Image (spheres, rainbow, N blue to C red):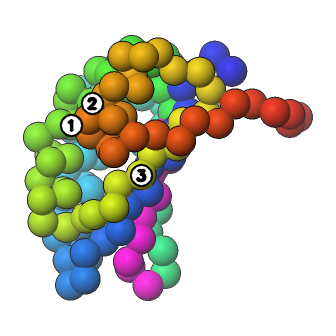
Amino acid sequence: MSHLELVAHMKIRPGQLERFKARAAELVRLTRGQDTQTLRYDWFIDEVGMECEVHELYLSEQGLMEHNHHIMEARDLLFKDAASDHRMAVFGAISPELRGLFDKHAGGVSRFSFFQGL
């Protein structure tokens, strides 16, 4: 796997769906306008509006670090007033530096190694 793929999962705070959507839209806007190595940044909300997953794909680990720098303040606002229980899963090997970012901003990360596929 040459790219860095990850999934973020979070809960939407009760009564904050519209605020959550506005904050998420700002994160997407920043990503679209500033990132140079982001290939995918897709947000999915469950049918009851209480949970969200973000599917992310970067050209490299450096791309995720660039992305993190661009969205840091907007992401902090999202979790301050509209989201909680942030969990991350990464698919593939990551550096100690990136693991440290996950520990700082997402309460750690679950790492999955490729097993088999098409």
The residue at 68%/21% (across/down) is: 1
- Alpha-carbon distance for marks 3 and 2? 15 Å
Amino acid found under the numbered disc labelled 3: Arg
- State how far apart marks 1 and 2 are (Cα): 5 Å
| Contact? badges 3 and 2 (CB < 8 Å) | no
Is tag 3's residue or tag 2's residue first in the polypeptide sequence? 2
Magenta stretch bounds: 48-56
> Distance from label 1 to label 3 (Cα)?
17 Å
**Type of residue at label 2?**
Asn
- Please indicate whether residue 32 sits to the left or right of residue 57 in the image: left
Q: Secondary structure at mark 3?
A: strand
Residue 107 among magenta residues: no
Pointer 1 and pointer 2: residues touching (CB < 8 Å)? yes
From the viewer's perspective, tell me whether residue 81 is left or right of residue 20: left
Q: Choose the circle earlier in sequence order: 1 or 3.
A: 1
The residue at the point 63 percent across, 16 percent down is 2
Q: Main secondary structure of the magenta part?
A: strand
Classed neighbour count for the residue bearing mark 3: other residues with Cα under 10 Å, few (<14), some (14–19), many (≥20): some
Q: Is residue 33 above or below residue 7?
A: above
Q: Which residue is mark 2?
A: 68
Q: Is residue 53 magenta?
A: yes
